[in-house]
Image (cartoon, rainbow, N blue to C red):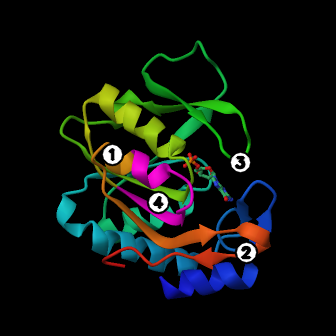
Amino acid sequence: MKELEERIKAVGTVLPGNVLKVDGFLNHQVDPDLMQKIGEAFAARFKAAGVTKIWTVESSGIAPAVMTGLAMHCPVIFARKHKSLTLTDGLYTADVYSYTKQVTNQISIAQKYVAKDERVLIIDDFLANGQAVTGLMEIANQAKVEVVGAGIVIEKAFQPGRQELEAKGIPVMSLARIQSLAGGQVEFAPADEGE
Ligand code: 5GP
């Protein structure tokens, strides 16, 4: 998505450890107009997949996920990063190692919001090593619902997340693909097909 690439170039900054900071439109301040276009792009890509629900992880996945849910007219669940390791009644849970925070969070989704025969589209802000999406897929496994794809706003194509997910049979669509952040410079990889 050209507009997204241009915004990353204009306001993105590169932090040590190959972390791209995009607090200006995605991770702190949110640009609703850009989020709406992002939601529409995911909806167009996955319109034939019979999606019944969008899943994401709090907090930075929520804005693009809600806009995708709006475009696809389906509800959105954000998995919570909850603190208690024992209070798990009525919850599906999975452990997720956070790339940026370098801690493991337990994420959870309430069982009462997961119906049988659900077809889930996972949306997230970034794809790095694929841990967040894999955690949601673990929950989908426990709940016996199908994951039909993953829509990613910014993919770091030099990290193995996409290969991990595609090896599990999950189609991945990202709207901006970053080839390298070396030397503090953002270099883009060719866009996804259908983008
Ligand atoms: P993964 O789970 O694929 O290893 O990493 C994706 C998650 O880590 C995303 O949900 C995002 O919150 C965070 N993340 C990974 N890389 C970056 C990055 O370069 N910048 C930002 N802002 N978040 C990132």
Q: Earlier in the sequence, mark 2 or mark 4?
A: 2
Q: Which amino acid, mark 3?
A: Thr
Ligand 1 within 8 Å of the CB at mark 3 = yes
- Does the segment drawn in magenta span residue 185? no
Please name which of the two marks, 4 or 1, marks the residue nearer to the observer: 1
- N-terminal of the pair, mark 2 or mark 1, is 2
User: Which circle marks residue 167 in the picture?
Assistant: 1
Select label 2 or label 1 by which is in front.
1
Q: Look at mark 2 in the image and give the residue it sits on.
A: 12
Q: Nearer the viewer, mark 4 or mark 3?
A: 3
Q: Amino acid at mark 4?
A: Ala
Q: Residue at x 52, y 71 (%)?
A: 177
- How far apart are labels 4 and 3 at the CA level? 20 Å
Q: Residue at image x 56%, y 54%?
A: 159
| Residue density around tag 4, few if under 14, some if 14–19, many if 20 or more, within 10 Å | many
Q: How many marks?
A: 4
Q: Secondary structure at mark 2?
A: loop
Place of residue 111 in the rendered image (x, y in percent of width and height, measured from the top left): 37, 28
Check contact, mark 2 vs mark 3: CB within 8 A. no
Provide residue 43's location: percent of width, then percent of height.
32, 70
- Alpha-carbon span between mark 2 and mark 1: 30 Å
Secondary element type, mark 1: helix
Question: Picture coordinates of residue 59 (x, y %)?
Answer: 62, 50
Instruction: Pick whichever of labels 4 and 1 is earlier in the sequence.
Output: 4
Q: Earlier in the sequence, mark 4 or mark 3?
A: 4
The region drawn magenta spans 150-164
Q: Residue at label 3?
A: 100
Q: Earlier in the sequence, mark 2 or mark 3?
A: 2
Rendering coords of residue 77 (x, y %)? 44, 46
Task: Indicate left or right for 10 with 3 as reference.
Answer: right
> What is the CA distance from the residue labelled 2 to the residue labelled 3?
16 Å
